[in-house]
């Protein structure tokens, strides 16, 4: 047998480690390995060990090499395989949408925990991949969910996710800064709008800056709350009495967020921290008439 021409699972794993460990933390590399073998061979993590002596066909070795070289370019693995896990579901993602973040799962949990009644009417502004809207549609009872995004491409991705996950969501290509007036329509308006100030770019990872859509992330330094101001104003009429706003926010501006929402007449404005202890969410209630 000619060893040099055949690659076993074990050898392949070693090679992936040696190429990626200089660039990524060890734990992340092990995560990559599990994801690669799941996608390329439909292996569970235990199979990687049990079948370590299995020889890989050349086309599989080529596939793995291609993935590893994309990871060397710091392309996020969710884009490499067009898949991101969020709130227990697998979402299709590509470079036209942000990769769903774990913090945003906390936002979904918060809404599900606090809104147990059925038939809620919900708006998700700036839906991106649709992760919030679709997860809410699957978790809330008989909710009517509308999701908007300014990006045509994002709406295409979000719609595909709703179809694949069998979630009932209505989609619209719409700028949240320019919403048509409606009155007393929604119980909940949720948003994770762009909130990273341009000036914060230098603290961000290259893989975010190079691959994720800037339009979904950044706001001008001189107006970092622009999307919140627009949605807060919109909510004054678009929410039902007693309706609620739920936002993911930039942890640098909790006080400004609270002042903005209280200034617009919202009650019980509550800031909340994320799992890392950062001010990451705000909830506000429209007065009950
Ligand atoms: N949490 C994201 C990040 O830090 C930003 C999300 C957003 O701008 N809405 O990359």
Image: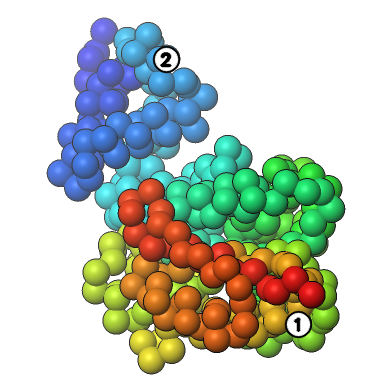
Rendered residue at 29%/75% (across/down): 200
Q: Which mark is residue 237?
A: 1
Q: Is mark 1 within 8 Å of ligand 1?
A: no
Rendered residue at 70%/74% (across/down): 287
Sequence-wise first label, 1 or 2: 2
| Disc nearest the viewer among 1 and 2 | 1
Position in image of residue 83 (x %, y %): 53, 45
Rendered residue at 82%/81% (across/down): 182
- Residue 92 visible in image: no
Q: Is residue 32 left or right of residue 18?
A: right
Position in image of residue 214 (x %, y %): 44, 74
Q: Secondary structure at mark 1?
A: helix
- Residue 14 visible in image: yes
Q: Residue furthest front?
A: 289
Which quadrant: the C terminus? bottom right
Q: Is mark 2 within 8 Å of ligand 1?
A: no
Quadrant location, ligand no. 1: bottom left
> Would you place residue 1 above or below residue 129 in this image?
above
Q: Is residue 122 left or right of residue 106?
A: right
Q: Secondary structure at mark 2?
A: helix
Which image quadrant is residue 224 in?
A: bottom left
Measure the C-alpha gap from mark 1 to mark 2: 56 Å
Residue bearing mark 2: 47
The one of 258 and 46 positioned closer to us in this rendering: 258
Q: Is residue 241 left or right of residue 245?
A: right
Position in image of residue 8 (x %, y %): 31, 17
> Would you place residue 69 above or below residue 241 in this image?
above
The one of 260 and 175 positioned closer to us in this rendering: 260
């Amino acid at each position: 047998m000619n060893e040099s021409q055949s690659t076993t699972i074990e050898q392949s794993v070693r090679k992936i480690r040696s190429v990626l460990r200089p660039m990524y933390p060890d734990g992340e590399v092990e995560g990559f390995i599990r994801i690669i073998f799941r996608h390329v061979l439909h292996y569970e993590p235990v199979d990687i060990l049990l079948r370590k002596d299995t020889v890989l066909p050349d086309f599989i070795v080529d596939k793995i090499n291609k993935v590893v070289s994309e990871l060397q370019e710091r392309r996020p693995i969710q884009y490499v395989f067009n898949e991101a896990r969020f709130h227990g579901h697998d979402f299709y993602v590509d470079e036209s949408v942000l990769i769903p973040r774990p913090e945003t799962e906390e936002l979904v949990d918060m809404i599900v925990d606090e809104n147990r009644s059925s038939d809620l009417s919900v708006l998700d502004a700036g839906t991106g991949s649709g992760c919030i809207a679709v997860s809410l549609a699957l978790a809330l009872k008989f909710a009517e969910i509308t999701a908007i995004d300014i990006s045509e491409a994002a709406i295409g991705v979000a719609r595909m996710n709703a179809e694949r996950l069998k979630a009932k969501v209505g989609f619209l290509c719409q700028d949240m800064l320019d919403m048509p007036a409606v009155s007393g329509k929604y119980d909940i308006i949720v948003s994770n709008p762009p909130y990273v100030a341009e000036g914060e770019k230098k603290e961000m990872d290259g893989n975010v800056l190079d691959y994720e859509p800037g339009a979904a992330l950044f706001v001008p330094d001189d107006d970092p709350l622009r999307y919140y101001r627009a949605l807060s104003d919109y909510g004054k009429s678009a929410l039902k009495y007693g309706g609620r706003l739920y936002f993911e926010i930039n942890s640098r501006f909790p006080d400004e967020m609270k002042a903005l929402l209280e200034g617009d007449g919202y009650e019980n404005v509550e800031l909340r921290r994320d799992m890392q202890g950062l001010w990451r969410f705000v909830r506000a209630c429209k007065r009950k008439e």
